[in-house]
Image (cartoon, helix red, strand yellow):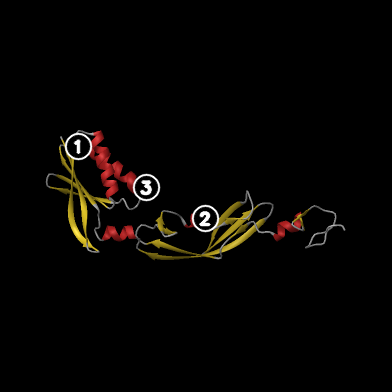
Amino acid sequence: MEKFCFLCGKKGTRLKDGYCLECYKKKTKLVDVPKNINLVACKKCELYRIKNDWKKASIEQIILNNVKDLEKNVKIKLIKKGKSWEITATKGKDEVHKVDTTVRTMICPVCARKFCDYYEATIQIRGEFNDKIMNFIIDLMLHDERKDPKSFFSSSDVSGGIDIKFGNKKSAISISETVKRKFDCRVTKSFKLVTMRDGQNVYRDVICIRFI
Protein backbone atom coordinates (compact mmCIF):
# COMPACT_ATOMS: atom_id res chain seq x y z
CA MET A 1 0.00 0.00 0.00
CA GLU A 2 1.36 3.36 -1.03
CA LYS A 3 1.92 5.75 1.86
CA PHE A 4 0.27 9.16 1.87
CA CYS A 5 0.30 12.36 3.93
CA PHE A 6 -2.15 12.28 6.87
CA LEU A 7 -3.05 15.95 6.35
CA CYS A 8 -3.24 16.63 2.60
CA GLY A 9 -3.34 13.07 1.26
CA LYS A 10 -0.36 13.59 -1.06
CA LYS A 11 1.20 10.33 -2.26
CA GLY A 12 4.62 9.42 -3.58
CA THR A 13 6.52 11.91 -1.48
CA ARG A 14 8.90 11.75 1.45
CA LEU A 15 7.05 11.60 4.77
CA LYS A 16 8.07 12.66 8.26
CA ASP A 17 5.96 11.40 11.18
CA GLY A 18 3.19 10.67 8.67
CA TYR A 19 3.22 14.12 7.02
CA CYS A 20 4.75 15.40 3.80
CA LEU A 21 7.48 17.96 4.44
CA GLU A 22 5.22 20.91 3.57
CA CYS A 23 2.46 19.80 5.95
CA TYR A 24 4.99 18.85 8.61
CA LYS A 25 6.25 22.45 8.67
CA LYS A 26 2.68 23.72 9.02
CA LYS A 27 1.73 21.16 11.66
CA THR A 28 4.74 21.29 13.95
CA LYS A 29 5.70 24.15 16.24
CA LEU A 30 9.18 25.62 16.28
CA VAL A 31 8.98 26.95 19.84
CA ASP A 32 6.83 26.66 22.92
CA VAL A 33 5.96 30.07 24.41
CA PRO A 34 3.87 30.85 27.52
CA LYS A 35 0.94 33.20 26.92
CA ASN A 36 1.60 35.14 30.12
CA ILE A 37 4.76 35.88 32.09
CA ASN A 38 4.42 37.40 35.56
CA LEU A 39 7.47 39.35 36.72
CA VAL A 40 8.50 40.70 40.10
CA ALA A 41 10.93 43.64 40.14
CA CYS A 42 12.56 45.60 42.95
CA LYS A 43 11.40 49.22 42.74
CA LYS A 44 14.69 50.42 44.24
CA CYS A 45 17.43 48.60 42.31
CA GLU A 46 15.33 47.15 39.42
CA LEU A 47 16.56 43.60 39.95
CA TYR A 48 14.12 40.87 38.94
CA ARG A 49 13.16 37.86 41.03
CA ILE A 50 14.04 34.78 39.01
CA LYS A 51 13.47 31.35 40.56
CA ASN A 52 13.49 32.71 44.14
CA ASP A 53 16.68 34.69 43.53
CA TRP A 54 17.13 38.36 42.64
CA LYS A 55 19.15 38.97 39.48
CA LYS A 56 20.02 41.77 37.09
CA ALA A 57 18.22 41.11 33.82
CA SER A 58 16.12 42.77 31.15
CA ILE A 59 12.52 41.85 30.39
CA GLU A 60 13.73 40.70 26.95
CA GLN A 61 16.21 38.28 28.55
CA ILE A 62 13.58 36.88 30.88
CA ILE A 63 11.10 36.35 28.04
CA LEU A 64 13.70 34.62 25.85
CA ASN A 65 14.63 32.36 28.78
CA ASN A 66 10.98 31.27 28.90
CA VAL A 67 10.95 30.32 25.20
CA LYS A 68 11.53 26.61 24.69
CA ASP A 69 13.01 25.60 21.34
CA LEU A 70 11.29 22.53 19.90
CA GLU A 71 13.55 22.46 16.84
CA LYS A 72 17.30 23.05 16.45
CA ASN A 73 18.78 26.25 14.99
CA VAL A 74 15.62 28.32 15.34
CA LYS A 75 16.09 32.09 15.01
CA ILE A 76 14.14 34.16 17.53
CA LYS A 77 13.11 37.80 17.10
CA LEU A 78 11.46 39.79 19.89
CA ILE A 79 9.47 43.01 19.32
CA LYS A 80 7.58 45.16 21.83
CA LYS A 81 3.93 45.63 20.85
CA GLY A 82 2.29 48.01 23.31
CA LYS A 83 1.93 46.12 26.60
CA SER A 84 2.63 42.80 24.88
CA TRP A 85 5.61 41.22 23.12
CA GLU A 86 5.66 39.55 19.72
CA ILE A 87 7.98 36.59 19.29
CA THR A 88 8.81 35.46 15.76
CA ALA A 89 10.51 32.07 15.41
CA THR A 90 12.05 31.37 12.02
CA LYS A 91 13.25 28.11 10.45
CA GLY A 92 11.88 27.50 6.98
CA LYS A 93 8.76 29.38 8.05
CA ASP A 94 7.79 32.25 10.36
CA GLU A 95 5.93 31.33 13.51
CA VAL A 96 4.51 34.25 15.51
CA HIS A 97 3.56 34.17 19.18
CA LYS A 98 2.19 36.84 21.50
CA VAL A 99 3.27 37.13 25.14
CA ASP A 100 1.61 39.30 27.77
CA THR A 101 3.78 40.44 30.69
CA THR A 102 2.81 41.87 34.05
CA VAL A 103 5.34 43.45 36.40
CA ARG A 104 4.71 43.63 40.13
CA THR A 105 7.08 45.75 42.21
CA MET A 106 8.35 45.24 45.73
CA ILE A 107 11.56 45.84 47.68
CA CYS A 108 14.14 43.07 47.41
CA PRO A 109 15.86 41.76 50.58
CA VAL A 110 19.14 43.51 49.70
CA CYS A 111 17.52 46.94 49.37
CA ALA A 112 15.48 46.30 52.51
CA ARG A 113 18.76 45.75 54.35
CA LYS A 114 20.31 48.87 52.86
CA PHE A 115 17.47 51.15 53.88
CA CYS A 116 17.30 49.61 57.36
CA ASP A 117 21.06 50.25 57.79
CA TYR A 118 21.70 46.51 58.00
CA TYR A 119 25.30 45.40 57.77
CA GLU A 120 27.34 42.37 58.82
CA ALA A 121 30.83 43.82 59.14
CA THR A 122 32.80 47.04 59.44
CA ILE A 123 36.28 47.76 58.14
CA GLN A 124 38.02 50.56 60.02
CA ILE A 125 40.70 52.30 57.94
CA ARG A 126 43.29 53.88 60.21
CA GLY A 127 46.88 55.14 60.18
CA GLU A 128 48.92 56.52 57.27
CA PHE A 129 46.80 55.78 54.19
CA ASN A 130 46.52 57.75 50.95
CA ASP A 131 44.36 58.04 47.81
CA LYS A 132 46.18 55.16 46.10
CA ILE A 133 45.28 52.82 48.96
CA MET A 134 41.67 54.00 49.12
CA ASN A 135 41.21 53.68 45.35
CA PHE A 136 42.51 50.12 45.55
CA ILE A 137 40.03 49.29 48.32
CA ILE A 138 37.16 50.97 46.46
CA ASP A 139 37.92 48.95 43.31
CA LEU A 140 37.76 45.74 45.36
CA MET A 141 34.42 46.75 46.89
CA LEU A 142 32.90 47.68 43.53
CA HIS A 143 34.09 44.39 42.05
CA ASP A 144 32.41 42.41 44.84
CA GLU A 145 29.21 44.45 44.59
CA ARG A 146 28.97 43.79 40.84
CA LYS A 147 29.33 40.05 41.44
CA ASP A 148 26.88 39.91 44.34
CA PRO A 149 24.34 42.65 45.17
CA LYS A 150 24.44 41.51 48.82
CA SER A 151 27.99 42.89 48.96
CA PHE A 152 26.79 46.48 49.22
CA PHE A 153 28.75 48.98 51.29
CA SER A 154 28.69 52.49 52.69
CA SER A 155 31.51 54.62 54.08
CA SER A 156 31.80 57.53 56.46
CA ASP A 157 34.62 59.75 57.69
CA VAL A 158 35.28 59.35 61.40
CA SER A 159 37.86 60.69 63.81
CA GLY A 160 41.17 59.06 62.87
CA GLY A 161 40.12 57.53 59.56
CA ILE A 162 37.26 55.96 57.59
CA ASP A 163 34.65 53.37 58.55
CA ILE A 164 33.21 51.15 55.81
CA LYS A 165 30.06 49.12 56.48
CA PHE A 166 29.56 45.88 54.53
CA GLY A 167 26.30 44.06 53.85
CA ASN A 168 28.28 40.84 53.38
CA LYS A 169 30.99 39.97 55.90
CA LYS A 170 32.64 37.53 53.47
CA SER A 171 33.40 40.50 51.22
CA ALA A 172 34.86 42.48 54.14
CA ILE A 173 37.08 39.57 55.21
CA SER A 174 38.28 38.91 51.65
CA ILE A 175 39.08 42.58 51.04
CA SER A 176 40.99 42.94 54.31
CA GLU A 177 43.11 39.88 53.46
CA THR A 178 43.86 41.23 49.97
CA VAL A 179 44.84 44.64 51.37
CA LYS A 180 47.11 42.99 53.95
CA ARG A 181 48.99 41.14 51.19
CA LYS A 182 49.31 44.29 49.08
CA PHE A 183 50.29 46.97 51.61
CA ASP A 184 52.31 47.44 54.77
CA CYS A 185 49.58 47.32 57.39
CA ARG A 186 48.36 45.55 60.49
CA VAL A 187 44.95 43.86 60.54
CA THR A 188 43.07 43.06 63.74
CA LYS A 189 39.65 41.49 64.09
CA SER A 190 37.05 41.72 66.82
CA PHE A 191 33.35 41.06 67.23
CA LYS A 192 30.56 43.30 68.48
CA LEU A 193 27.34 41.93 69.97
CA VAL A 194 24.46 43.63 68.15
CA THR A 195 21.33 41.63 68.99
CA MET A 196 19.83 38.26 69.85
CA ARG A 197 17.97 36.10 67.35
CA ASP A 198 16.11 32.92 68.28
CA GLY A 199 17.90 32.91 71.62
CA GLN A 200 21.34 33.19 69.99
CA ASN A 201 23.77 36.10 70.17
CA VAL A 202 24.34 37.83 66.82
CA TYR A 203 27.74 39.44 66.35
CA ARG A 204 29.07 41.92 63.83
CA ASP A 205 32.66 41.59 62.53
CA VAL A 206 34.87 44.62 63.14
CA ILE A 207 38.11 44.61 61.12
CA CYS A 208 40.68 47.31 61.75
CA ILE A 209 43.31 47.93 59.05
CA ARG A 210 46.04 50.20 60.35
CA PHE A 211 48.54 51.41 57.75
CA ILE A 212 52.09 51.97 58.95
Q: Are marks 3 and 1 in contact (CB under 8 Å)?
A: no
Q: Residue furthest left?
A: 159
Could you tell me which residue is drawn at 68 percent across and 54 percent down?
A: 93
Vertical order, 171 against 52 (above or below)? above
Q: Nearer the viewer, residue 203 or 16?
A: 203
Q: Secondary structure at mark 3?
A: helix
* Figure quadrant of the N terminus: bottom right
Residue 135 seen: no
**Disc 2 residue type (three-letter):** Asn
Q: Nearer the viewer, residue 102 or 31?
A: 31
Decide if residue 116 is on the left or right side of residue 87: left
Residue identified by numbered label 1: 130
Q: Nearer the viewer, mark 3 or mark 1?
A: 3
Label 2: few (<14), some (14–19) or many (≥20) C-alpha neighbours in 10 Å: few
- Which badge, 3 or 1, is on the more N-terminal residue? 1
Residue identified by numbered label 3: 147
Q: Secondary structure at mark 1?
A: loop
Cα distance between the residues tagged 3 and 1: 26 Å
**Residue 65 shows which numbered tag?**
2
Cα distance between the residues tagged 1 and 2: 46 Å
Location of residue 58 in the rendering, given as x and y in whole percent from the top left corner: 46, 55
Label 3: few (<14), some (14–19) or many (≥20) C-alpha neighbours in 10 Å: few
**Disc 3 residue type (three-letter):** Lys
Vertical order, 131 against 168 (above or below)? above
Cα distance between the residues tagged 2 and 3: 21 Å
